[in-house]
Image (cartoon, coloured by chain):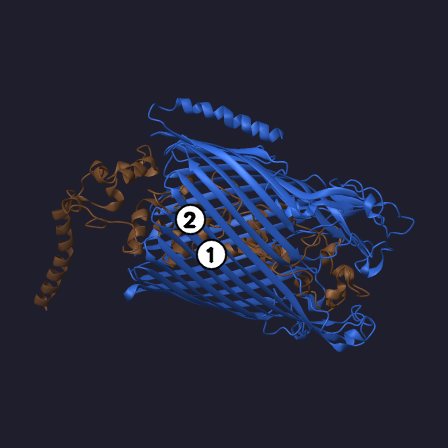
């Protein structure tokens, strides 16, 4: 709040500077006030989803925005302010002297509401110490909201007066406060689950300084970026109900993100060469250090340190009108130099990625543009301290080929088709790892094909129609156990049509189809390992239509919008029959389970439906009024959240792998909301 | 031999002299000045004068050169022929060669600090020209003279990205509006080109970009989760997802894609493991937030090599 007042005062103090402008100043602006009343029916979490990134009060309120632009031959000053009446507001002022310098100051807030009225058996949600012990009487639990608020403020200036040299400086601070869900396993991960409210009290400062030179044929810039991240809470302390005497009752700690500092220096350069060619480079080095406050890590002497190194070189040439050429090389290295002398934490990931490639583009007759290229990527990983030969990560070699063809031969049509192929080889370091049938998808060999086609049609100057289709298929060719395939279709259309001075029509339609195939093998609990397969399918489709009807041109406009989006996911299982008969088969034996009744039919299923109707009346060129009504409904169903229970099994005893104390994160996201709004705006 | 050489040299000389002669004939007389343009195109003239192109204080701005004709070329013939769209004048439109349109802008802007790497831009490769997105004459309020404000400008071509942002879990792009500092497409991407020639992100790596806003994820942690420092995109979508927290796939399957042969991650968790399901063991690995019910520090931990603390 203090920061908000300081920023606001700073901004207000700068406004009188506008008086310093000469008499040729041009002033424009707009002030608008809007009254909103809304009603949400649904459970508390639904209200959080409805206001996920916005700050609305159900009892209604009056909210406002303002814009002021001052512009002269020599100076400019712009002021934006918004969301008066909300808890979260924003202000921005930018100005300067044309061709000499620019500055800006800003303050911005945005909430992220996750779940309202969550519950915990502990006292102290939002703080670093949770007091008490879990109990099964949910009615006695404390309530709180899962919500995070980001407040960003800062400013900067850009100096051009020393042209062709330039200097940019910017600073930004972000305060993030709130609570988000996390979870811990008391005792071991094979026992009950304990969901906890994690306090978020972060402060991040970012400073960027860039100085350079920009005048043909040369561009040079040096950048320094500094960032520090400070977490007010090193850990979340709670009583682990499974810890036996003599330590029973002593607080246990869940570690929270450590404080860290980040420095980066970078050089960027470009030089124009003969034959319409250009050489560009980017060299960067960064160092991140973390400072832990966790006692056991301090005593073990842990130091968190990661360096990155990046080189980019690119040469482009357009020697003749019909040819574009590009070749490039990139080297990126992450070097984890963290140290842990006592070996408490001793697996640190380092990797380096080398990339080189080239592209050629041809302007062909009949307004055809053909481009194609090749890229090679080699990724090498190193896990410091890894002793398990099967766990040693492979290195990957990617060969990527692509071709695109664009045609603009007709005045009313553009068409584009493209294809990309990725062949990824995974080279495992040991015989054990090479013959292991299990593969981790992010490292596994894969063949990926991507096809895309786009058509844009504009038969009339005021009619546009676009269609886009993509198909992507990934086969994890060497994977026997793990993710084996990923296929997706995407079809998107959009259109808009301006009917003279009568109306504007617009709309879109989207369809998406995604399917994953995964083969697994359960080794634990069964005498003989048994396989199971899960095909996950996700179909999403939606449309939106809207119109603006100019009932009385330049006076009365009616706006109507309707959007619909539906997602339908499911999982089709095929399990080895042994799961249904043998003890230890994932708890499916002896309960009448079979391959016909275990499939998941509700898997992030939702339908989002909304419409809005609004009337805008311009009393004069400057004064306008609007009034409207909006309706929005989300129906959300999901196998993991339907029938939500805070205590599992209900009434206890909470123990074993069916047990859990949960807090309600993400439950009951469905809502139905009505909004009535009206406002006035004045432009000058 | 000498005669043949003389002929060749003469031909070359003619080819060299013809363009020079043409320029001499044209001279600068083709320029008529912006005030003449104003007579017929007052709206365009006003928007030009109001824009940064019309500021005399900006060195090298068009108003300090040939005014309207800095971009549209000499207009004397256009006037002589009685005007008309594209009649003896350069206009920005589909019928004009894309590289010629770009060259008008690049003549001044290529040397600026904002456009040093246009040569690397995917937009340039796909023959997307400056005037596809920018207009001096019809821009929306805000910086950069965009024809339409972000994100709608970008969604005009990137329809699949628009569809992703409509999904229930998304970055707050749609919640941004003019004047607000909040997240925009250009917060992460530089459409003018970066060294990431395909996605044009404003960083040397995906993770470097993500850590700008999510600094708490950068560690370095005592117990790293391998896919995290390598690439956030191993588990997260960038623009939007049907699954909360922008996950590419739903947990537990996402986790089981890698943790697939040992211990409880190797088990199938089915509909019967839901809150009301009859499964006799393993239900707390499925219901609620699934694996994350226990492995809360999945991005890295200071205490647990299984990210339980």
| Chain that is blue in the image | A
Task: For mark 1, name the chain.
Answer: A
Q: Percent position (x, y) of residue A17? A: 44, 24
Q: Are marks 1 and 2 in contact (CB under 8 Å)?
A: no
Marking on residue B228: none
Disc 2, SS: strand
Q: What residue is pinned by disc 2?
A: A269
Give the left or right position of residue A128, taking residue A137 as reference.
left
The reply to whether residue A613 is in sight is yes
Mark nearer the N terminus (1 vs 2): 2
| Chain that is brown in the image | B
Disc 1, SS: strand
Mark 1 or 2, closer to the camera: 1
Q: Quadrant of residue A324?
A: bottom left
**Do circles 1 and 2 both sit on a common chain?**
yes
Q: Is residue B279 above or below residue A281?
A: below
* Residue beneath the point at 86% across and 45% down: A250
Q: What residue is pinned by disc 1?
A: A508
The reply to whether residue B302 is in sight is no
């Amino acid at each position: 709040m203090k920061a908000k007042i300081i920023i606001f005062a700073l901004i207000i103090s700068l406004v009188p500077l506008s008086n310093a402008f000469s008499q040729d100043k041009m002033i424009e602006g707009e002030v608008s006030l809007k009254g909103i009343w809304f009603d949400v029916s649904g459970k508390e979490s639904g209200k959080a989803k409805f206001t996920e990134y916005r700050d609305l009060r159900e009892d209604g309120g009056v909210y406002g925005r303002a814009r002021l632009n001052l512009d002269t031959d020599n100076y400019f000053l712009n002021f934006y302010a918004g969301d008066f009446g909300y808890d979260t507001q924003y202000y921005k002022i930018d100005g300067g002297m044309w061709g000499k310098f620019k500055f800006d100051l800003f303050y911005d807030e945005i909430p992220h509401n996750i779940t309202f009225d969550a519950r915990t058996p502990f006292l102290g949600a939002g703080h670093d110490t949770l007091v008490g012990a879990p109990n099964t009487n949910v009615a006695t639990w404390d309530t709180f909201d899962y919500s995070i608020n980001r407040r960003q403020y800062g400013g900067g200036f850009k100096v051009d007066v020393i042209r062709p040299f330039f200097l940019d400086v910017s600073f930004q601070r972000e305060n993030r406060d709130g609570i988000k869900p996390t979870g811990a396993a008391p005792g071991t991960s094979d026992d009950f689950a304990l969901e906890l409210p994690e306090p978020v009290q972060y402060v991040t400062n970012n400073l960027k300084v860039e100085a350079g030179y920009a005048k043909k044929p040369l561009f040079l810039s040096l950048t320094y970026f500094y960032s520090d991240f400070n977490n007010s809470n090193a850990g979340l302390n709670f009583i682990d109900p499974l810890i036996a005497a003599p330590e029973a009752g002593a607080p246990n700690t869940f570690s929270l993100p450590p404080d860290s500092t980040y420095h980066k220096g970078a050089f960027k350069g470009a030089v124009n060469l003969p034959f319409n060619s250009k050489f560009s480079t980017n060299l960067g080095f960064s160092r991140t250090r973390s400072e832990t406050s966790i006692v056991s890590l301090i005593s073990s002497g842990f130091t968190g340190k990661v360096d990155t190194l990046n080189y980019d070189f690119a040469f482009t040439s357009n020697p003749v009108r019909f040819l574009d050429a590009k070749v490039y090389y990139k080297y990126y290295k992450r070097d984890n130099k963290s140290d842990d002398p006592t070996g408490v934490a001793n697996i640190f990931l380092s990797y380096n990625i080398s990339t080189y490639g080239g592209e050629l583009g041809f302007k062909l007759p009949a307004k055809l543009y053909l481009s194609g290229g090749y890229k090679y990527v080699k990724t090498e990983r190193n896990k410091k301290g890894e002793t398990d030969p099967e766990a040693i990560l492979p290195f990957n070699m990617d060969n990527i080929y692509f071709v695109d063809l664009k045609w603009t031969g007709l005045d009313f049509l553009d068409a584009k088709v493209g294809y990309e192929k990725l062949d990824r080889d995974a080279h495992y370091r040991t015989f054990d790892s090479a013959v292991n049938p299990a593969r981790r998808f992010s490292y596994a060999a894969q063949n990926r094909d991507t096809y895309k086609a786009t058509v844009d049609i504009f038969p009339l100057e005021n009619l546009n129609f676009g269609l886009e289709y993509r198909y992507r298929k990934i086969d994890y060719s060497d994977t026997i156990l793990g993710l084996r395939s990923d296929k997706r279709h995407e079809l998107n259309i959009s259109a808009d049509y301006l009917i003279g001075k009568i109306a504007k029509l617009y709309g879109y339609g989207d369809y998406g189809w995604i399917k994953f195939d995964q083969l697994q093998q359960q080794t634990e609990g069964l005498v003989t390992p048994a396989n199971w397969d899960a095909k996950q399918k996700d179909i999403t489709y939606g449309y939106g239509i809207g119109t603006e009807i100019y009932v009385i041109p330049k006076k009365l406009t009616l706006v109507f919008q309707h959007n619909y989006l539906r997602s339908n996911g499911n999982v089709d299982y095929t399990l080895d029959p042994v799961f249904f008969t043998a003890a230890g088969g994932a708890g499916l034996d002896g309960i009448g389970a079979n391959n016909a009744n275990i499939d998941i039919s509700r898997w992030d299923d939702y339908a989002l439906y909304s419409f809005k109707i609004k009337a805008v009346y311009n009393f004069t060129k400057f004064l306008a009024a609007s009034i409207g009504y909006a309706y929005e409904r989300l129906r959300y169903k999901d196998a993991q959240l339907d029938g939500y229970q805070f205590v599992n099994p209900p009434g206890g005893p909470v123990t074993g792998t069916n047990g859990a104390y949960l807090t309600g994160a993400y439950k009951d996201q469905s809502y139905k909301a009505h909004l009535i709004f009206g406002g006035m705006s004045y432009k000058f | 031999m000498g005669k043949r050489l003389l002929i060749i040299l003469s031909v070359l000389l003619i080819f060299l002299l013809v363009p020079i002669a043409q320029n001499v004939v044209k001279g600068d007389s083709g320029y008529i000045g912006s005030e003449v343009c104003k007579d017929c195109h007052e709206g365009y003239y006003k928007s030009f004068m109001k824009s940064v192109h019309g500021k005399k204080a900006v060195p090298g701005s068009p108003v300090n050169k040939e005014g309207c004709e800095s971009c549209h070329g000499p207009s004397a013939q256009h006037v002589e022929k009685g005007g008309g769209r594209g009649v003896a004048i350069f206009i920005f439109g589909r019928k004009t060669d894309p590289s010629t349109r770009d060259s008008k802008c690049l003549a001044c802007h290529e040397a600026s600090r904002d456009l040093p790497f246009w040569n690397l831009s995917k937009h340039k490769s796909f023959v997307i020209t400056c005037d596809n997105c920018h207009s001096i004459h019809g821009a929306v309020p805000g910086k950069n003279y965009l024809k339409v404000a972000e994100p709608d400008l970008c969604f005009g071509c990137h329809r699949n990205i628009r569809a992703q942002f409509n999904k229930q879990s998304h970055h707050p792009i749609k919640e941004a509006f003019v004047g607000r500092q909040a997240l925009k497409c250009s917060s992460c991407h530089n459409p003018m080109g970066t060294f990431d020639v395909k996605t044009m992100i404003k960083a040397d790596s995906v993770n470097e970009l993500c850590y700008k806003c999510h600094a708490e994820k950068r560690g370095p942690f005592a117990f790293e989760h391998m896919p995290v420092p390598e690439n956030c995109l191993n588990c997260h979508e960038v623009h939007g997802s049907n699954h909360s927290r922008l996950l590419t796939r739903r947990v537990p399957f996402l986790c089981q894609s890698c943790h697939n042969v040992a211990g409880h991650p190797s088990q199938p968790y089915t509909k019967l493991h839901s809150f009301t399901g009859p499964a006799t063991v393993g239900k707390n690995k499925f219901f609620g937030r699934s694996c994350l019910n226990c492995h809360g520090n999945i991005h890295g931990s200071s205490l647990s090599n299984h990210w339980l603390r």
